[in-house]
Image (cartoon, rainbow, N blue to C red):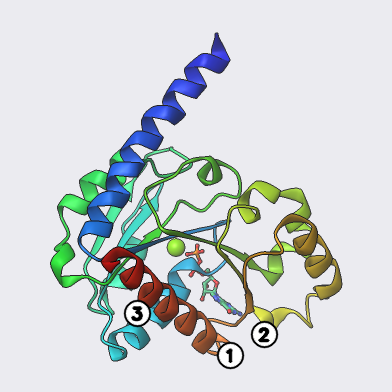
Amino acid sequence: MKINVVKRVLEANDAVAASNRTLMSDAGVLCVNITSAPGSGKTTLLVRAIPALAEAQLASAVIVGDLQTTRDAERIGATGAPVTQINTEGGCHLSATQVTHALHGLDLAETAIVFIENVGNMVCPAGFDLGEHKRVAVLSTPEGDDKVAKYPTLFQPADAILLNKIDLAGPLDFDRRTFYDDLKAINSRSPMMELSARTGEGVDAWVDWLVAAHTQHAQTAGA
Ligand SMILES: Nc1nc2c(ncn2[C@@H]2O[C@H](COP(=O)(O)OP(=O)(O)O)[C@@H](O)[C@H]2O)c(=O)[nH]1
Ligand SMILES: [Mg+2]
């Protein structure tokens, strides 16, 4: 009985997610859902990418989920991109319905990429499709080189994996071999990018991946 209840919740979420995806596809908008533990650098990576995307004539809008506060929205809003903060008030992930409400407040005709910064959590967001076209999983070196194997559900469905805070890899004895071996066993199909949102190293590759994903999406939507 319990299993049925959970299944119904997920099915209902999936149906709403599918309509979010159609809404954005019809508007030619690419949606990217970013998942990670709290503090991996999701907001910093967005603050880095948004101005670079603007230079490539790609306008971003952001939906950001947190348990409390509007701090991330303030940081992202300083880039000039429209941002909607969803406070989940205890909820450990965003739901497709919350994203639907946030999308109603965005001008999709003026937007190329909608980013969703999910609630910082390595477990809950993984099971909830929000209507994204691409999912990105971020690990940062302070979390430890063993986390891919411990939290496979975060990394398995990701279309790109970012290893952030590589400026700290040396001091923290982050063992890349463990990380890469674990990742190969769990997800070998998706690109992996090492970067530092602090120093800017590797950020170009992250931006290039976003631009390419947008181009591919526009071609598919137009076909
Ligand atoms: N050293 C270092 N710190 C970083 C890097 N990226 C983010 N940070 C810091 O890590 C903290 C958490 O980053 P934030 O973007 O808020 O993470 P979020 O919770 O995933 O959105 C902040 O103090 C950032 O300045 C990085 O590449 N290197
Ligand atoms: Mg954040």
Q: Horizontal and vertical percent for residue 10?
A: 45, 30
What kind of residue is marked 1?
Glu
Badge 2 vs badge 1, beta-carbon distance below 8 Å: yes
Relative vertical location of residue 74 with respect to residue 208 in this rendering, above or below = above
Q: Is residue 79 left or right of residue 167?
A: left
Q: Horizontal and vertical percent for residue 138?
A: 58, 65
Tell me the element at label 2: helix
Q: Which label belongs to residue 190? A: none
Q: Which label belongs to residue 167? A: 2
Tell me which corner region of the image, top left, top right, bottom left or bottom right, holds residue 91: top left
Q: Which label belongs to residue 201? A: 1
What kind of residue is marked 2?
Asp
> Callout 3 environment at 10 Å: few (<14), some (14 to 19), or many (20+)?
many
Q: Nearer the viewer, mark 2 or mark 1?
A: 1
Q: Is residue 148 left or right of residue 92?
A: right
Q: CA distance from mark 2 to mark 1?
A: 9 Å
Among the two numbered marks 1 and 3 on one chain, the one whose residue lies closer to the N terminus: 3
Q: In the image shown, does 111 or 25 lie closer to the viewer?
A: 25
Query: Is ligand 1 within 8 Å of the beta carbon of the residue shown at mark 2?
Result: yes
Relative vertical location of residue 82 with respect to residue 157 in this rendering, above or below = below
Q: In the image shown, does 37 or 162 lie closer to the viewer?
A: 162
Residue at the spot 40% in from the left edge and 51% down from the top edge:
66
Ligand 2 is found in the corner quadrant, namely bottom left
Residue for badge 3: 50
Residue at the spot 22% in from the left edge and 78% down from the top edge:
80
> Callout 1 environment at 10 Å: few (<14), some (14 to 19), or many (20+)?
some
